[in-house]
Amino acid sequence: MDEELTARENLEFHGVLYKVPKKLRKERIRELLELVELWDRKDDLVKTFSGGMRRRLEIARGLLHHSKIFFLDEPTLGLDPQTRSRMWEYIT
């Protein structure tokens, strides 16, 4: 994550790198930021985020481009129980 960018800018940048079409990219960014409960912080710089918020944003970034294979090494480490449950439900 680039700490000098907002949550939305980080996901936008990542989506462009992975060639996610613009319309889909905007939809996915909103969907994922809502999923990880960061939509209300979408325009805040990442450097103002707590460790757990950064972790949730990293997960959203990894899910943005619908990869065929997604390796997860303790993906919910540092997340609160509600977010952890929602993540596993979404990934499943």
Image: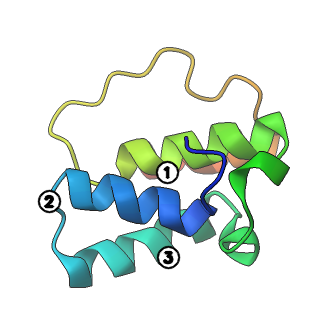
Taking depth in this image into account, of 75 and 17 the one nearest to the observer is 17
> As shown in the figure, which amino acid type bears the numbered disc 1?
Ala
Q: Which residue is painted at 54% across and 68% down in the image? A: 8
Up-down: is 72 above or below 9?
above
Neighbour class for label 3 at 10 Å: few (<14), some, many (≥20)? some
Confirm whether residue 92 shows in the render. no
Q: Residue furthest bottom?
A: 23
Which of pointers 2 and 1 lies earlier in the amino acid sequence? 2
Confirm whether residue 5 shows in the render. yes
Neighbour class for label 1 at 10 Å: few (<14), some, many (≥20)? many
Q: CA distance from mark 2 to mark 3?
A: 17 Å
Q: Quadrant of residue 21?
A: bottom left
Disc 1, SS: helix
Residue for badge 3: 30
Q: Is residue 42 left or right of residue 80?
A: left
Which of pointers 2 and 3 lies earlier in the amino acid sequence? 2
Up-down: is 87 above or below 8?
above
Disc 3, SS: helix
Residue for badge 2: 19
> As shown in the figure, which amino acid type bears the numbered disc 2?
Lys
Residue for badge 1: 60
Taking depth in this image into account, of 15 and 72 the one nearest to the observer is 15
**Percent x, y for residue 22?**
22, 79
Disc 2, SS: loop
Q: Which residue is painted at 84% across and 52% down in the image? A: 48
Nearer the viewer's eye, disc 2 or disc 1?
Answer: 2
**Percent x, y for residue 37?**
71, 63
